[in-house]
Structures are given as C-alpha cells and as structure tokens.
Image (cartoon, coloured by chain):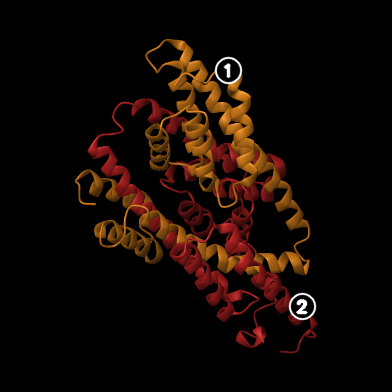
Chain colours: A red, B orange
Amino acid sequence: MPNLENPPVPLAAELIPPSLARPASLVALFWAISGIALQGFGGVLAVVQRELVEKKQWLTTEEFVEDWAVSQIMPGPNVVNLALIIGDRYFGWRGALAALAGMLTFPLFVVMALTIGLAGIGHLPAVQGALRGMGAVSAGLIAGTGIRLVPALRTNAMGTLACALIAGMVFIAIALFRVPLAWTLLGIGLPAFFWALHCIRTLAAVPQGQP
Amino acid sequence: MTGFGYANLLDLLGCFVTLSLLSVGGAITTVPEMHRFLVAQNAWLTDSQFSASIALAQAAPGPNVLFVAVLGWNVGMASGGGPANGPLPWALASAAMAVSMVGIIIPSTTLTFFAARWGQRNRERPEVRAFKQSMAPVVIALLVATGWLLTASHGNLQQAPLLWVLTVASALLVWKTRIHLLWLIGAGALAGVLGLV
C-alpha cells in the first residue's frame, strides 16, 4: 500500500530533475573542494550541502542524499567518500583523486600547524572552552543539515509515512538507546531495504499511464 | 614512552589499514579500537595525549579523519623525545603521520570508489534503487542523532544546559537561515572562551 501515500511521484529515478551545473575543470573541482574543506569546522558535511547543492547546484538535494547514503554506508570518512563519488561522477578517477586531494591537502597543513603551535597551550581553560563551544555549534550544524535534507524524502518510493517511521526509529536507536550502527543498519535498514524493494517492484508492475 | 621506532611503522600501518576497512560510519567510530592499540596495548601515547589529539583535530577545519594524522604525529613525537630533541623526533613524527594517513584513507576510499561505480552502472536495478531509497531516511536520522550524541557527550540537559541551547540554536539557524556557518562556529568559540558554556 505504499503507493497510496503519494501516487504520482514514486517513479522517482525518472522524475528527479537532473542537477543543473557542473565543475568546469579538474582544477576548479580541486579548489572548490579545498574551499569547502577549509570552512568545515567540526564536520564538513554542512558546508558541502550549502556550497554544492544550494550555491553551485552541482547536485540536487535528492542526488546529494543518495550519494551521502553510499558515503555513509561504505567504510571510511564520510565526507571524503562523498567528495570521491562526486569527483568520479564528473571526471572519472582523475576527478576522484582531485576531490580527495582537495578534501585533505590544505586541512592537513592546518591541523599539523595547530598541533605544533598549540603543543604547549592545549590545556588552558580558554582553549578548552573554545573547543567545547565550537563542538556544541558543530553538533548543531550536523543536526540542522539533517533536517534540511528532509524534503528529499518527498519523492521516496517507500512513501512519506514509512520514511518518517524509519527515521524516527533510527534516531531513537542511535541517540537514545546508543545501539551500535551495525545493529541499527541490520535491524532497521535491512527491513527498510526489503520494503523499498517491494514498493519499487509493485510500482513497476503498474502499467504506464495508469495511476 | 620510547617504545615506538621506525621498525613499528609497519605495525601502525597494519592497524590503520584494518580499521579503515571497518570504519563504517566514519573513522571516528573506530576510536575505541585505536585507543586500545596505541594506549593500552603499546603505550605509545598516554590517555591525555590521545584525547587531546582528537579534540584538537575536531576543532580544526576539514574532515574529522585528520585526527588520525595528529595521532600518528604525536606517537612519533612522543617516542622521539619531543620537539626540542633535534631533528630526530620530527622525522619520526612525519613518517608516523604519513603512514597513519595512508593506512586509514587508501583502503576505504578504494573500496568506496569501486562500490560507487558499480552502483552507478547498475542504478536502474531494483536492488540498487531500493538500497538508495531505503537508506535516505536512515542517513538523515543518523545526522540528527550524531548532533545529539556529540552534545550529549559533554553532559545532559541539567549538567550543561547552555551547551544544549547553543547546539539547538545553531541547528535551527542552519535549518531556517542562510547565515554563514563560520559565524556560528566563531560565536561558539567566543561563548566558550568567555566561559558561558
């Protein structure tokens, strides 16, 4: 019954609008990702969403959520995976390398400079306080970015009700009961996968042109 | 604290290569295992050196995984006798940093690269579409939960009420406005320096 939720939309792949723009060159990609990485205090994802989806429009919100899903499910640092996937999409393996280099090169210099420079003063109350305050803000940035992505669920094949249910259960499991990610994915993600598969097959069985 | 030498670079590489392939959800999820290897098992770092390394990398711009570079650097620096001990510790620290980063980055990115390509080639298959569709609400909820957990690690609402206010306010601002994110980070740092949170 998922298709009763939102009958006209769920042939999602065809209806998602293609992204509007693309990076002009490998060099442009490298600098764009470098700029994003250097603005990402306490997590780069919020900046990636702002810059690549909203400002540059290299990706639609739907594409962003799909790529993010792959980045997060695969092992490795999520934003690094995300940059790799986006780079590969536009320029193949050279794009993946350029994006990877952009994500890591300058931030590595900055963090090493901080490590060497702050070696003696890291324990001072003011430094500790600043770190704590920045940590609280970056926690908010990550959560706020999550909320901002919710509209991408409107075209989801599983229907909005199922999406809300799945999201709610994942939040409760991870945030309130501290269930490890692997178990959450097995317990909630796997049933969700089969539900989505069922919805997609049901929709595919409906002849074209009929509701 | 002098246990680490060039002969241990391979051990370090092996540790991070393994953890790279296990780091579903980000390198930060393998911190407990890194702590076991670097602090408890080999005593290459003390407890406070370990925590300070992670806190520092979190405050710097860029992907969180850079805490691994700081860990590697500090392993070499501590065992070489500290920064004032001539060029030797600097060389050891650089080598340990490079080995750690290569170990944590290369395996997972290679795997992701080929998996994402496979998914892109087969994107019309029902299984691939179902995977992406079913993971969308999961990863969105994970982001909100991560924000929650990060702030909760500093204390609950009674212990650190202003910290929670700061987190919720920045979440709302990101959600509803287009204010530049660096202003928010700066405000957080300032509130911390002034001792408000």
Rendered-image quadrant of the N terminus of chain B: top left
Q: Identity of the amino acid at label 2?
A: Arg
Q: Residue at x 40, y 18 (%)?
A: B82
**Residue receiving disc 1:** B6
Give whichever of A110, B72 is nearer the camera. B72
The single residue placed furthest to the top in the displayed view is B86
Residue at 35% from the left image edge and 62% from the top image edge: B173
Residue at image point 52% right, 72% down? A169
**Is residue B69 in view?**
no
Image coordinates for residue A88, horizontal then vertical, percent: 68, 47
Q: Gap in Å between the C-alphas at discs 1 and 2?
A: 57 Å
Of residues A90 and B45, which is closer to you in this image? B45
Mark 1 lies on a secondary structure that is: helix
**Residue A159 rendering spot, x and y as whole percentages:** 61, 79
Residue to which mark 2 is pinned: A201
- Name the residue at 46% across, 11% down: B87
Residue A199 versus residue A149 in the image, above or below: below
- The crowding category of the residue bearing disc 2, from other C-alpha atoms within 10 Å (few below 14, some 14 to 19, many at least 20), is some
Q: Amino acid at mark 1?
A: Tyr
Quarter of the image where one finds residue A209: bottom right
* Image position, residue A32 (x, y; %): 53, 44
Count of numbered tags: 2
Does mark 2 fall on the same chain as mark 1?
Answer: no
- Left or right: A117, with A34 as reference point: left
